[in-house]
Image: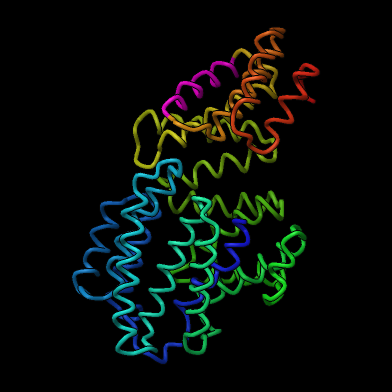
Amino acid sequence: MRLLWLLFFTGSWFLPTVAVAQSSVLYEPEVQASASAGLEALYDFQFARADSLFHLISEQHSDHPIGPCLEALTLWWTILLNLGDRSHDEAFFAAMDEVIQRSNERLSRNKSDFDAMFFKGIALGFRGRLRSNRRDWIRAAADGKRAMDYVLAVADADSSNADFALGRGLYQYYAALIRDKYPSLRPITAFLPSGNRRLGLQELIRTATDGYYMQTEAMYFLVQINYLYERNFRASVEQISWLRDRFPNNSFFHTLEGRIYAGWHQWAASDTVFTAVLERYKDRQIGYTPSMAEQALYFLARSRIVKDEPSSALTFLLSLEALTARLDTDSYFRVLGRLYQGIAHDLMGQRDQAVARYREVLRMKRWGSSHSNARRYIAEPYVAHQ
């Protein structure tokens, strides 16, 4: 469902680069300079600097939808850093509603207002994305579709603009991916234009190479695609290295780097990354939230399991258990951590403790193959390197 929603949502990225036949705040040199610097600061988690630059734009355009849109970006990243925390949702939705309201006021005066269509599409896209993260699929899809409607309503697109290629590339890639890998969704996507994964990747690479506003977004999407779907290790490492070099304080990119190495069983590199993540969490560096520490502890434990060091793995897993005790729900890392506790006990020959952990997993929320693996190891002890 999240992939299907993304297919609709990609439309919201078409908006910034349609033909510049109309005047737009986006092409004012002062706005471009402040917005570009603000985005650079935002991605590097220099939130105070980003806020000051975005606030400057907001003051200069006090009744324009650009203000609440930009000023909500640090809030957006705060939510992304800990999706299990919903305490910021109301404020973010309110900000997007303000963007939509200001856009509607402009559209009531001029139904072809470029900036109104642009920012309303962006706000609907962001609102839909958060609703998707909250598994509010119906309203998320409605927001995504409305965002795309605004994309199609905007004036002729400027195909020479590299930023424009991002939205087109995302649509091309995910439209083809869904049809290739998720045949059960074909009836839902049958009415949508077909896609092409190769062409989609070419468009994304173009934006990542030559884009102005959307270069970082394009690089992030390329990392995700090459890591999750194309399974291209070399490209994943090259692209995440670009993001890490440019934004060394971004914990989201930092943990993604570690997951990439772990995904290809490069455990020495993974250990280096996640040890650094854990140290930054302990030092209370901005962005290094408990959820980031959970990932670090989990993957450090998995590395020790692979190295047949179950006692060391269990130390990390018990720290993970203590960290997730703050949660009211069974998070992914709490459940998988409990499963790996059982595995560690099995490797240490402590069969009763292992079975007890596996049975606990079966009483918890199912994440992926957690329940099937727990049943498997109840029936037969975990064996190293299986």
- Between 210 and 314, the one nearer to me in the picture: 314
Relative to residue 219, is residue 241 depicted above or below? above
Q: Residue at the location (71% across, 55% down)?
A: 230
Question: Which image quadrant is residue 378 in?
Answer: top right
Q: Residue at the location (65% across, 10% down)?
A: 353
Question: Which image quadrant is residue 6 in?
Answer: bottom right
Task: Verify whether residue 382 appears in magenta.
Answer: no
Task: Verify whether residue 323 appears in magenta.
Answer: yes
Q: Residue at the location (49% across, 66% down)?
A: 215
Q: Main secondary structure of the magenta part?
A: helix
Highlighted magenta segment, given as a residue range: 312-326
Quarter of the image for the N terminus: give it.
bottom right
How far from the left and from the top, in percent, is residue 114? 38, 84
Relative to residue 296, is residue 109 depicted above or below? below
Position of residue 381 in the picture relative to residue 362 (left or right): right
Question: Which image quadrant is residue 123 in?
Answer: bottom left
Position of residue 384 in the picture relative to residue 342 (left or right): right
Q: Residue at the location (35% across, 30% down)?
A: 283
Relative to residue 189, is residue 242 depicted above or below? above
How far from the left and from the top, in percent, is residue 169? 61, 71
Count how many numbered circles sit on residues in the image: 0
Relative to residue 336, is residue 114 depicted above or below? below
How far from the left and from the top, in percent, is residue 347? 71, 13
How far from the left and from the top, in percent, is residue 15? 47, 77
Quarter of the image for the C terminus: give it.
top right
Position of residue 102 in the picture relative to residue 348 (left or right): left
Q: How is the image coloured?
A: rainbow
